[in-house]
Image (cartoon, rainbow, N blue to C red):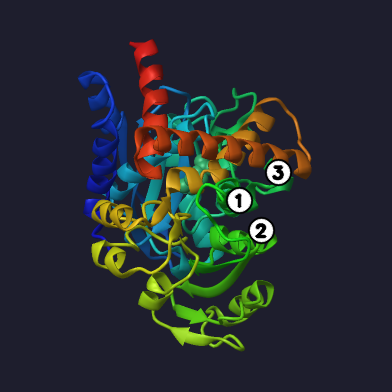
């Protein structure tokens, strides 16, 4: 596992690699490397027991040249400022790759929400909203769900923010990823997973993906579970799955619906009928057609990159491949479909949600899904074409597309 303080270094190394083949003015390059604002907060959380805990948190606003800062709120015991800075920077590239009018930001609280009761989680999110309410807003910075946060947290946040900003005409637009009945968009919950499927499908000829292919999936949270459901429709069979408790395989294919039901009851996938337990190494290194890291950063390091036996990696997590691993994979001819393209479906539909909120509109599910597919297909084609033209990896191609767009916006502003 990567050390969290190195994650920002990882994001910078990727950026340097992209910049090395571009003509970007020094002052602009410096701006791209530096977050515009870093907010560090702490606030007390009253536990059900009456005990008071001090919570530490961050909101990093990396860049808003193309529009309001945009990016999720992550609750995790190992969250660090360096990590949030990296994630905020990746959001800037992601919104630029899919060309939605947002910048990049990210937030995090250092806490394991699984140790909290529902009322405690509510108080936690409400206090976070009160603490950062002045620096967010529909035209300033628009948070969303991320690791361990869902529509429920979005509603708690929105409700506090709306009370503090009675002047705002469209308070729902302060945050995306809300449940549909609370002003959310059709298709948002499924968007990151389904966007990953659309990306894989859009690139299938270019990356020579077989008609029928096997998939190994690390992470069965919101993103992984919708990806698993969707990938079956384009010829994929999930033959291995891992979560934080362990990993399993069934070479005949795992029944995802039954597996999700099993996980809901048993809180783990280990022991699922007809499956065999495997190690995380086997999950990520075994011979599959596509490996899909959909958990946390740093899953694929250099030593893993040397022995991994799958020709394609689809990054649904943010930052799962380390720069040194990237170089090895590229030399070995392993194709990495980078996070800032592969998992951008979530923020794309976040944009649709924000747009519907700002215009008091409601799009039907089919409209959202069609628009998402069109957007992902177009982004995938642009990235592929750029990488082909520049003779680079898809990651560097995607970064160059993004950097060019953000740099142009910065130049217009200066
Ligand atoms: N947390 C998601 C991501 O990393 C979504 C962000 C958003 O919708 O703003 O892309």
Q: Callout 2: few (<14), some (14-19), or many (20+) C-alpha neighbours within 10 Å? A: some
Question: In the picture, which quadrant includes the C terminus?
Answer: top left
Determine which quarter of the picture holds residue 346: top right
Q: Are marks 1 and 2 in contact (CB under 8 Å)?
A: yes
Q: Residue at x 41, y 52 (%)?
A: 336
Q: CA distance from mark 3 to mark 2?
A: 15 Å
Question: In the picture, which quadrant includes the N terminus?
Answer: bottom left
Label 1 CB sits under 8 Å from any ligand 1 atom: no
Image: 252 above or below 368: below
Label count reads: 3
The disc label shown at residue 326, or none: none
Residue that badge 2 annotates: 234
Q: Is residue 176 visible?
A: yes
Residue that badge 1 annotates: 201
Determine which quarter of the picture holds residue 103: top left
Residue 63 percent location from the top left of the image: 37, 29
Q: Are marks 3 and 1 in contact (CB under 8 Å)?
A: no
Image: 288 above or below 313: below
């Amino acid at each position: 596992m990567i050390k969290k303080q190195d994650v920002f270094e990882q994001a910078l190394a990727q950026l340097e690699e992209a910049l090395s083949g571009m003509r970007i003015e020094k002052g602009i390059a410096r701006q791209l490397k530096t977050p515009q604002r870093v907010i560090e907060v702490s606030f007390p959380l009253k536990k059900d027991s009456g005990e008071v805990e001090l919570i530490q948190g961050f909101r990093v606003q990396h860049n808003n040249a193309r529009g309001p800062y945009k990016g999720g709120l992550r609750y995790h015991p190992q969250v660090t400022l360096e990590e949030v800075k990296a994630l905020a920077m990746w959001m800037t590239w992601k919104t630029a790759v899919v060309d939605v009018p947002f910048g990049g930001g990210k937030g995090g609280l250092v806490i394991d929400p699984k140790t909290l009761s529902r009322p405690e989680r509510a108080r936690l999110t409400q206090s976070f909203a009160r603490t950062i309410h002045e620096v967010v807003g529909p035209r300033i910075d628009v948070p969303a769900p991320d690791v361990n946060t869902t529509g429920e947290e979005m509603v708690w946040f929105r409700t506090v923010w709306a009370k503090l900003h009675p002047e705002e005409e469209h308070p729902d637009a302060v945050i995306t990823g809300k449940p549909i009945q609370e002003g959310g968009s059709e298709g948002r919950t499924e968007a990151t997973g389904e966007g990953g499927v659309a990306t894989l499908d859009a690139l299938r000829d270019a990356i020579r993906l077989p008609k029928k292919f096997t998939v190994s999936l690390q992470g069965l949270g919101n993103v992984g579970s919708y990806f698993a459901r969707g990938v079956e429709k384009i010829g994929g069979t999930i033959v291995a799955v891992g979560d934080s408790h362990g990993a399993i395989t069934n070479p005949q294919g795992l029944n995802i619906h039954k597996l999700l039901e099993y996980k809901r009851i048993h809180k783990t996938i280990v022991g699922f009928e007809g499956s065999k337990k495997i190690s995380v190494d086997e999950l990520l290194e075994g011979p599959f057609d596509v490996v899909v890291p959909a958990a946390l950063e740093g899953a694929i390091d250099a030593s893993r990159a040397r022995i991994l036996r799958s020709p394609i990696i689809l990054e649904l997590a943010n930052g799962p491949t380390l720069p040194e691993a990237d170089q090895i994979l590229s030399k070995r001819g392993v194709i990495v479909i980078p996070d800032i393209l592969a998992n951008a479906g979530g923020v794309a539909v976040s944009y649709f949600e924000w747009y519907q909120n700002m215009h008091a509109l409601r799009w039907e599910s089919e409209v959202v899904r069609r628009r998402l597919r069109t957007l992902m297909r177009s982004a995938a084609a642009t990235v592929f074409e750029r990488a082909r033209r520049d003779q680079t990896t898809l990651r560097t191609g995607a970064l160059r597309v993004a950097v060019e767009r953000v740099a142009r916006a910065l130049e217009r502003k200066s």
